[in-house]
Amino acid sequence: MVRAGLSAAKLTEAAAEMADEVGLEQVTVSALARRFGVKDASLYSHVKNLRELRVRIALLGGEELTDRIATEVAGRAGKDALVAFANAYRRYALEHPGRYAATQMRFDPEEVADSVALRRSIELTYGMLRAYGLTEPDLTDAGRLLRAAFHGYIHLELSGGFAHPREIEDSWSRSLDALHVLLENWPAHQPGR
Amino acid sequence: MVRAGLSAAKLTEAAAEMADEVGLEQVTVSALARRFGVKDASLYSHVKNLRELRVRIALLGGEELTDRIATEVAGRAGKDALVAFANAYRRYALEHPGRYAATQMRFDPEEVADSVALRRSIELTYGMLRAYGLTEPDLTDAGRLLRAAFHGYIHLELSGGFAHPREIEDSWSRSLDALHVLLENWPAHQPGR
DNA sequence: GTTGAAAACTAGAGGTTCTAGGAAGGGACG
DNA sequence: CGTCCCTTCCTAGAACCTCTAGTTTTCAAC
């Protein structure tokens, strides 16, 4: 009986690949065990349960995503930074739909307590927005809208929500133009109305 | 043996309630059968399989959602219409998270072929955007960005992505202000760059 | 070599989807 | 009223899934 040489990290990596290939909810303990030529029960020595496996995929994806964004955004500001951020985000999500989907799960605080990726991604966003001259609470509001727009766009794209003719690439880059304009004209907090 | 009096419509309604209560992926044929005091296999007389059940939830949700938006937007234009649209959308999603999640599934074209809701929701969006003086292809681009922003915002809100202090309500209405400004200043197609 | 922890196994309980074929309810029609 | 027949619901069972418990095997360190 030759050992497969499993470990939590190896399982996570394989599970992440599997998620990208066939979708996150097709990642099962059984299928993963099959891929390693091992019985289901064996995996439970390395990973608590299916839930933990998926959370690990999410953490892996989150780190990879923020790493990419960080390197792309480095040294840029203003619209350059916005476009670099957005494109890095989108490209990662399209290349790794399973990992990306995992990052959108609902987590209990303690599941992600030790994750630096989360904190860092917020810093990245805020740094970018400060270049537009925004301050709190506009920073928070603009950050939320931006995350929403990026995520929403990609979610719709991945789920086939953009059925029709016009090229998504063009549409996306026009949307980035628009978001840039939006950030430059962000309505001042508490206008006199 | 008293009959439960099942039908596809009744099952769909019950499944939708269940989805709102415990989440879409907790809606199983078994659980639904249990709710009606009936055996699993009985449901397969009314519904082809689990997939079809979920698609039915989605179609129901889509109709209810567009109905709400339509009545709220009726007779409004410009920012009034935008805010009414957005709030109707968000309120429905928060009240019916399960149905809403179902509408975000990936569908095969023939699964949703006979749905009027889809066509109508696009018309509603376009009507609203025309009031801002937009024309194709800006209509498509702005529509996509708007859908993305709404969906993204609600998705993040529902999945607990907005952890921190600032009130979501305030953030949301500031985002609507910003989107209104954005639509008024939508960058003209193909600027001279 | 012995020994002990870690990695894998067997066995099995319990949940799930879905198919096939059988029985019971209830309306239509002679 | 009785019979027919469609629909609804059932039993039975295959196939797959998660996860637990307890056992054996491997490998390295002593």
Image (cartoon, coloured by chain):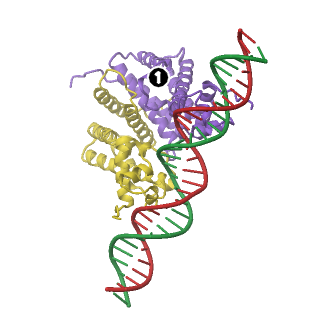
Chain colours: A purple, B yellow, C green, D red
Q: Residues within 10 Å of mark 1 (few under 14, many from 20)?
A: some
- Height in image: A59 above or below D29? below
Q: Quadrant of residue A187?
A: top left
Q: Quadrant of the C terminus of chain A?
A: top left
Q: Quadrant of residue A95?
A: top right
- Side of B136 relative to A93 (left or right): left
Q: Residue at x 33, y 29 (%)?
A: B175
User: x%, y% of residue A11?
Assistant: 62, 29
Q: Judge by depth and name the residue closer to the eye, B106 or B74.
A: B106
Q: Which residue is mark 1?
A: A112
User: x%, y% of residue A111?
Assistant: 46, 24
User: x%, y% of residue B154?
Assistant: 37, 35
- Side of C5 relative to A87 (left or right): right
- Height in image: A31 above or below D25? below
Chain letter of disc 1? A
Q: Residue at x 29, y 41 (%)?
A: B88
- Height in image: B132 above or below D9? above
Going by the numbered disc 1, the residue's amino acid type is Val
Q: Judge by depth and name the residue closer to the eye, B75 or B47.
A: B47
Q: Judge by depth and name the residue closer to the eye, B87 or B41.
A: B41
Q: Judge by depth and name the residue closer to the eye, B92 or B144.
A: B92
User: x%, y% of residue B44?
Assistant: 46, 59
- Residue A46 in sight: yes
SS assignment at label 1: loop
Q: Residue at x 36, y 46 (%)?
A: B18
- Height in image: B156 above or below A70? below
